[in-house]
Image: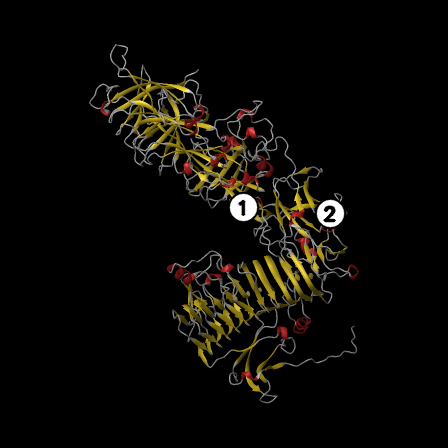
Amino acid sequence: ELDFDDLSFTRNHGPIRGLVVPNTIDGCWGDNTDVLVTSHTTANKDQQVRTITAIESPDGPDGNRVLVLDRSILNAPSLATDPDTAVEVALLNRNIRFDVDAVDQGQYNGNQRSDMPQGGHLVVMNTPTVVQQLSGVQFSRFGQMGKAWRHPINFMMSRSVAGSVVSNNVIREAYHKCIVVQGTDDLHIKGNVAYDTKGHCYVLQDGAETGNTFEGNLGALTKEIKRDYRSPSGDTGNDPATFLISNPRNSFIGNVAAGSDEEGFWFELRRWSVRGLSKERMAAEGISNGYMMLQRAPITLFKDNVAHSNGVVSLRFRDYFPTDGEQVVQGFKSYRNAYGVWMYYAADIAFEGLYAADNYEKNFDINRADNIRVQDATIIGYSDFYRKQVASQDLWHHCHDWDGALVGIEFNYFQESVTRYKPGTRVENVRFSGFADTGCSKSAAMAVDERERRGIGNTWNEFTQLKSITVVDNSPLYDGQSAQIALVDDVVMNDLDGSLDSAPDNASSFGVLVTNKEYMTKLANGTCTEYPDLHYSYCANTCLRTVHYLTNIFETEDIKLRAIDNNDPSRFVDFDGNMQMDWGWYKQEDGSWKQELNQWNNNHDYKNRVFSASLPSPLPKPDDDGYTPGYTLKFFDVNGNQVWPSYARKIIEPAPDAECPTWSDDAVTIDVPPLTNGDCHDLIRNGDVDTYGNFTHWMHTSGGAFHAEGAGIDNSSAVASISRWSHWQQISQYLDSRCVKAAVGRELEFKAWFRLEQKINNVWVPYTCDPDSRDYEKGCPLVRMYMKKYDSNQADQDSRLERDFTNMIGAVRPMSPEGEYSMIHGTMMFDEQMGDYDTFFLSIGRTKHNSRVYIDNVSLKPLQPESLSSLPYTIGRASVGLASRSASDASGATESQPIIMNGNFEEYDTTMYWVGRDRHAALELVQVNGLNGEPTTALKVFDRHYQWYGPAQYVNPHDFVSGQEYEVSFQYKLTDSDGNSVICDPSNNGWGYERCPVARFSADARPNGGGVSYPHIGSTVSPGTSENPWGVVHGVFTPGSNVINAYKVYFYAEYPHPDLDMTIDNVAITPYKFVCTDNIIQNGDFEQGHFAFWEKAGDHRTSLSITKGYGTDSNALKVSGRHYYDWGVYQYIHDSCLSAGHMFKVTAKLKMTKEGAEPWWECNIESTDRNYYCPSITAKDHGVVASVVGKSGMSDDNEWDGWYDVSGTFQMYERDVVNDFYLKIERAPIGVDLIIDNIIVSEILK
């Protein structure tokens, strides 16, 4: 039995049958009209619609009015009982009403659908500068679901309509939006009421709309449209927002979003900016529609707006990064929604005067957002007023259907990126209440989003500052357990004024809220108080600043970062590394699904293991004014050995405000352990993919980097990128930064083997790429290096550098058969600019999209003979002798390499080291008869689209010494498309078939303070003949400063007509040292078959060639096309042979021919008539130094052979030494060809 005694019941109020409203309704509101009372709960459908049966004036004509209702309503907050959350009351009728006789059915997939209504619609179209007014009208059952531009009110493509007003209208039972502004500016939308509508309601449609003002409008019961029924204009009506804002350059003042299925206010700022008809108009008018243009635009005005009773979010910002400074949201009210304010990927937004209450999950959610300021705000978790309403009306209470948490401000533990820091989040003068005894499993004024649980430890990088924080009614300040669930153990929230310190004895003027872990409190400068129930600690008179080091994810699992106080080495703290990891759901063989680590994401290029050191102000060193306080940071393994995690990229959080002292940027220094012999023998790790038996050290830039067992060479393992959808997706690896820095100035050889697959008829089949194509869809994988370093002047603290090795490294010919592995090969140089960076990310890829790429046996080693590859050595700038190809060390342990590698094309049987210039020419090895008539392997260059496209090779600039001369030479043959030999004309400088090849450098010294230059280093010195079409290019050059100081130098053979193929052989560059002892004339006997060192004196009609010389099987130089008697040939004397005061003897053999004078032409040494002159040899500033002596000689068969002896002497003077000194053979009659041989100029010894 149960007995009760002394029961009492107190009547609070009876049924509510009337509403008290101001007398301003007079003349507008009347009997038998409908009135809306918006929802007063967290449910968007709890609005109440009643009919007014009478209007009373109990306080006389000057007092308020009472609307007598046909039925009672639930007690809702009013201005008298709870002014911050008072419901809105709106009249739902107008005297002028637009309606339809019958609602048609829409069609979907050809079928009539009763749930796809088609009502009326009103369009104001293409009326620029015309002032329109649409006021006091009711629209019922307007809008056509599933059809673009069919809305109750649509101002469409009217440009500026300044002065036009849409006001005080009612829109009820709308089937597709409410008031839509599309391609229209400067419209004033004021005092309208929309109730029971579908899809977005008040809409800026395309994103091109600016200068419009939405003021005092009400939207209630905004319902979703089925996804399939959305209009074809890319709408998002299945996620309806009462106010859809697609361009922030508009004003929103005093509007109310009272009960949407999804969003109240939504800044829907699309990445690709303007859409729809406005996009088409902009394109037609040539107006730019810039990427992220809308996401960076400023907000004109957003003030005193209200959102309540919305199903998801009251105010939503996503992808908003304004570039005009901080944007301010003024006086926003958000209550009784699921979420209050939600910011996702956003920045630079301030909320001033925010009121947030009774939002049953989060009141203010900061998710990957930065530079967010909340100031002068009131945040209430579960208000007393609403608790009473829930109890008295049996409403759903907070956390009624889920075991969740009620949070005032929720932080995501990371911003958009750990590398992007702005001023962070600042919360100032905020009052929290209503977070105690809420009925939820957890409640707190602040917490971390525990649903972002990813990885094996996550890093807190939500830089946060708090000031003047008030927490009342025993509400928990911070739920530290939420961070632990999210695997975040390094939360830092600096308290700028000590307002969070609940221990009065501390007398804090500032402090810090941290995770209650020893490494977060160990070095604190003040007392730390632990709050174990809330899982956090508060350290008085301490502020922390964090430095992050981003490191390799591989082989760093068990290392720690130690921060050591420079003043006292015994004061140190160790920090673990954290790595955010991604999980995915994978279907198992039995059909079930299992959650596993997502490998595709977890070795993506953006993944790092992050070591975060949160440190207070370092202690000063007593009695040492010269000491700079700070910390030294080192990495240690589990055995206490100092180690290096491949790279350590520094990111420093901003310093807290001045009232919260920490440390300066230069107070932290990372200590890099020295290299040991063999550390950098191969800069690629796990290059054979078998060393580790998995994909360790291999990453990707999308496309995946998977361990492919049995897919490599000889059934070994390979690394495979098998999820590629674009050409830019690459297989990659971080290099050890120490090795790169130590290798600056050294040339390294890259090798890799690859094979490719493409899908045909849904089957993966092998295919062969074109190593000479720059078209990614046809070309082979290429190699690039991406570098970063700390730069405090950059927004993301990163300075970036990229090196494209396309012209240095590529696939070589001959390619292997389809399905087999082919080689990528080339060399690269690490220059001084690269050595200044911190991270080095080498990538292989940029080939056909949707293809699969398999890579095996990758290496990057200092260039040296293969036979010595196992020798240990230390790479370093001190090893100057090893910096070039051509050098060898004093011990002879390393052999020299030629400056031009693979110059005879016999050693490697491939095109290794050679590319078509800029990948615009194709290469292949060919078997031909060479210059000497013997079979040889040569390099053929074809598909030359411009005259300068030809064979190219990267050469090591460190092979060149300032002041040293070098000789360049190669043999060539030109053929047309039919394979016929073409003989060029060295005297022709035009662009026709007659243009001969030249040798040239391309030197880029910009990273080292120089410029770009293209020095000419060799010319054709023998064009070949019809009998032997092989020509010769030769030159002697002294490299200039741009070559000496270049970070990259290319050798080019270029200039033949682009329709001609060029075959080259025996390419060489060697140091040149001329010995003057016996002859100061270079190439005076022409026995090498070319006229190197000789230059013609004449114009384009003058030409040089090699002909039969003096004696048996010898060569001579022939000068043809002489149109003046002083035209001939000359040679500059080498500087090393110039000796003032010395006497020289000149001898030569000379023969002359002339058309019509066979077999030779005779001169007269005694004649004064220029028509019969004998040639002579002159010297600069000397005149004649040698002349013809006697008559021509006799041949072996006692016949005159036409060869004359030339002889003479001269003395060299001081003026000859300081000026360019030359000898010239000239003064033969016009039209006479000169044939010259055996020219000797030797010093007459005393």
Q: How many marks?
A: 2
Residue 800 tag number? 1
Element under label 2? loop
| Quadrant of the image occupied by residue 106 | bottom left
Residue 295 tag number? none
Q: Nearer the viewer, residue 1083 or 376?
A: 1083
Check disc 2: other Cα within 10 Å, few if <14, some if 14-19, many if 20+: few
Against 1092, residue 693 (above or below) is below
Element under label 1? strand
**Quadrant where the C terminus is found in the figure:** top left
Q: Which residue is mark 2?
A: 625
Alpha carbon distance from label 2 to label 1 = 38 Å
Q: Please indicate, yes or no, whether residue 1067 appears anywhere in the rendered image.
A: no
In percent of width and height, residue 714 lies at 51, 30
| Quadrant of the image occupied by residue 341 | bottom right
Q: Please indicate, yes or no, whether residue 854 appears anywhere in the rendered image.
A: yes
The amino acid beneath tag 1 is Arg
**494 displayed left or right of 372:** right
Against 368, residue 711 (above or below) is above
**428 displayed left or right of 989:** right
**1230 displayed left or right of 305:** left
